[in-house]
Amino acid sequence: MNMLKKLLAGLTAGAALTGWALTAHAAEIHFDKAPINLSDKDSLQHGAKTFVTYCLGCHSASFMRYNRLTDLGFTEQQIKDELILTEHKIGETMISAIDPVQAKEWFGVMPPDLTVIARSRAGEGYSGADYLYTLLRGFYRDETRTGWNNLVFPNIGMPHPLWQLEGERKPVFKLETVYGQTEEVPTGQWTQVTPGLLSADEYDKTVGDLVNYLQWMGEPVQQTRQQIGIWVMLFLVICTLIAWQLNKAYWKDVT
């Protein structure tokens, strides 16, 4: 019984420390506001092209069909020529061609489906789009590891998918003492190690367009739903006013 109590106490303390560590790390990260504009078809189209070029090789979007991209202004022929890079048909879902066995061997786990990733990553004080926008701009080469690391997702298993566009950057750290322990904390500043194909502003715009597309993909009917909601609210207001006037008319002679 004493051993069981000690085990439970240890698990409780471990859970508390883990929660404190996660909270402390989250507090250090400033999530930048993602430039979401679901009415910007040019941005959404650019984001869709970036997605199929740099993301779809490993990540699926198994709840999105290629022909749904006509909502963004693409023609079916454009989708076939520019967005379907495999032997998939236009009516099929956006499934990655990666072998699950190889994916687990390379990354340790099968890369997650991205259909609703922007909706699933929301947290207190930031949206899922803000999370993704900051994450994709937080990669850096880590000399202590075999590949890349990320300020938002430490020890991330995914290599930087857009590194050729951004180039290699190195975050600037500073030493801070927290609860008696000295550790490196990011300052929010970066040093460009090698240039990429895009300038810093061009890269930020590319990531913004990609995140804008991921936000749209999570709920393609979001704008329609919001528009219908406004009309429903107006309808209910009018019905309420009519019902109020009818109620006055019915009870005006009752003393």
Image (cartoon, grey):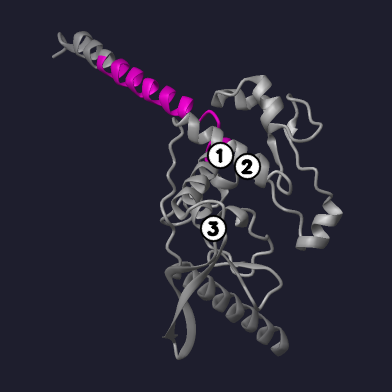
Q: Main secondary structure of the magenta part?
A: helix
Q: How far apart are the two marked residues, 1 and 3, measured between alpha carbons?
A: 16 Å
Residue 14 lies, in percent from the top left, at 61, 79
Q: How far apart are the two marked residues, 3 and 2, measured between alpha carbons?
A: 15 Å
- Magenta-colored span: 213-241
Marks 3 and 2, the one that precedes in the sequence: 2
115, above or below 24, in the image? above
| Helix, strand or loop at mark 2 | helix
Quarter location, residue 35: top left
The residue that appears at 41% across and 51% down in the rendered structure is 33
Q: Which residue is the site of mark 2?
A: 51
Q: What residue type is labelled 3?
A: Leu
77, above or below 184, in the image? above
| Helix, strand or loop at mark 1 | helix
Q: How far apart are the two marked residues, 2 and 1, measured between alpha carbons?
A: 6 Å
| Helix, strand or loop at mark 3 | helix
Few, some or many residues within 10 Å of mark 3 (<14, 14–19, 20+): some
Q: Which residue is the site of mark 1?
A: 47
The residue that appears at 44% across and 58% down in the rendered structure is 31
Few, some or many residues within 10 Å of mark 1 (<14, 14–19, 20+): many
Quarter location, residue 239: top left
Q: Which amino acid does label 2 sit on?
A: Phe
Q: Which amino acid does label 1 sit on?
A: Gly
Q: Which residue is the site of mark 3?
A: 135
